[in-house]
Image (cartoon, rainbow, N blue to C red):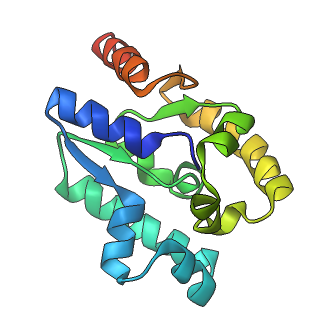
Amino acid sequence: MGSGKSSIARAYSKKNEYYFLDTDDMIESLENRSIDKIFEAEGEAYFRSLEKELVSWLKDNVSHAIISTGGGMLQHCEQLKELGTVIYLEVPFSTIVSRMSPSELQKRPLFQDKEEAKSMYEQRDSIYRKNSDLILDADCSINELVSRLSSAIASL
């Protein structure tokens, strides 16, 4: 959450002529409600089932795309790696907090308690490291990160 996944993916896809997809946006469109409303009404398990269904659909129907996923997707969707290269944008927790406005923080159901959010960040960090094909230091400007990402992908 708050690592800049969507911003970086959008900038990279524009520069490199890829389709840009954001799984959270897709789920909100399919459900016709926001992520926080889905969590509030149906709970996290239901949301994770939507993510799994979406990954399955993406795997069968999408190519030449850069996909920004929700922060928990790698942890909960085993099929994610079947979509392509998984990239972890590594950002210190303090930077994530500083990047988000109070209204953005309110929209994130798993970020309502900062101590719990930090604990989740620390737990996910090891999962991301273990399951990612590429880890990039993302504590920099969007332009710098797009350049780093382009170089890293070219060398794969």
Judged from this view, the residue extending furthest toward the right is: 115
Judged from this view, the residue extending furthest toward the bottom is: 41
Q: Give the residue displayed 29% in from the left and 34% down from the top.
A: 11
- The quarter of the picture where residue 105 lies is bottom right
Q: Position of residue 7 (x, y in %)?
A: 39, 41
Q: Give the residue displayed 32% in from the left and 66% down from the top.
A: 26
Residue 39 left/right relative to 147: right
Residue 76 seen in the figure: yes
Note whether 150 is above or below 88 in the view shown.
above
- The quarter of the picture where residue 64 lies is top left
Q: Position of residue 113 (x, y in %)?
A: 80, 62
Q: Position of residue 118 (x, y in %)?
A: 79, 48
Counting the numbered discs, the total is 0
Q: Give the residue displayed 28% in from the left and 31% down from the top.
A: 12
Residue 142 left/right relative to 41: left
Note whether 127 is above or below 46 in the view shown.
above
Residue 144 left/right relative to 92: left
Residue 48 left/right relative to 62: right
Viewer-nearest residue: 101 or 17? 101
Judged from this view, the residue extending furthest toward the front is: 102
Q: Give the residue displayed 40% in from the left and 15% down from the top.
A: 148
The C terminus lies in quadrant? top left
Judged from this view, the residue extending furthest toward the left is: 17
Residue 126 seen in the figure: no
Note whether 104 is above or below 151 in the view shown.
below
